[in-house]
Amino acid sequence: MTTFTQNLLVLAAVAIQSTLLSSAWAEKADRDKPLNAQADALKYDDLKQTSVFTGNVIITKGTIAMRGGRVDVRQDAQGFQYATITSNGNVQAYFKQKRENGVDEWIEGLADTIEYDGKADKVKLIKNANLKRLKGASLNDEIVGGLVVYDNTTDVYTVDGGTSQGGSGGRVSAILSPKSTTVAAPVATPQGALRQSTTLGGEKK
């Protein structure tokens, strides 16, 4: 094999690797994208690096979309952003983000309060929570509970039904679509599949 041929093979391998990495990590760039907001009012504190948006708030950040009556945003010293979205009383807080699996899948959530952690890439839906996994525009999975925590980097969710109706004793409701059975041999959990955890937010239930 000539040196020229070897160089071509190396360049081809690098190009393929770069394409795969850019696809797999495309949504991770959300945390580095600028935050764009529309609202009726804004209170910004430069010293504390906090912003309070009120009145029909609409926020986008890469593939992330947030809506609510009020959104509190803060930024830490490393530049990571955190948001708390609250209902306007009539319409629940809303959150949507593309999943970290290189395909056209989205996580969409509704709750009375939603907390987004840009550093950990986690979203927490608090009280009357509803989390959906969409393939394109089609519903694939749906989870209802009092508290839902979703980790976008690991595709792990945890659900607690304790406050699903605003009080104690609530229960979790789930619709989980079957995975494809066309694979010839048994495989591990498919990339991009939601996996249930026995912990809630890192603590034992």
Image (cartoon, rainbow, N blue to C red):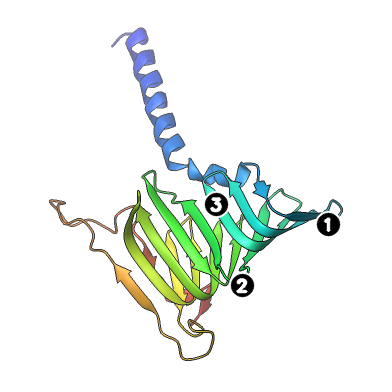
- Which residue is drawn at the image coordinates 46% and 91% (left, top)? 169
- Would you call the spot at circle 1 few (<14 residues within 10 Å), some (14-19), or many (20 or more)? few
Label 3's element? strand
Kind of residue indicated by mark 1: Lys
**Left or right side of 204 for 173:** left
What residue would you read off at disc 3? 65
Disc 1 from disc 3: Cα separation: 24 Å
Point out the frontmost of discs 1 and 3.
Answer: 3
Point out the frontmost of discs 2 and 3.
Answer: 2
Label 1's element? loop
- Which residue is drawn at the image coordinates 36% and 77% (left, top)? 173
**On the image, which quarter does residue 53 sit in?**
bottom right
Disc 2 from disc 1: Cα separation: 28 Å
Kind of residue indicated by mark 3: Ala
What residue would you read off at disc 1? 48
2 and 3 marks in contact (CB < 8 Å) = no
Q: Is residue 5 visible?
A: yes
Q: Is residue 120 visible?
A: no
Label 2's element? loop
Residue 72 placement (x, y as % from top left): 71, 61
The residue closer to the viewer here, 132 or 124, is 132
**On the image, which quarter does residue 139 sit in?**
bottom left
Disc 2 from disc 3: Cα separation: 19 Å
Dividing the image into 4 quarters, which one contains the N terminus?
A: top left
**Left or right side of 194 for 81:** right
- Would you call the spot at circle 2 few (<14 residues within 10 Å), some (14-19), or many (20 or more)? few
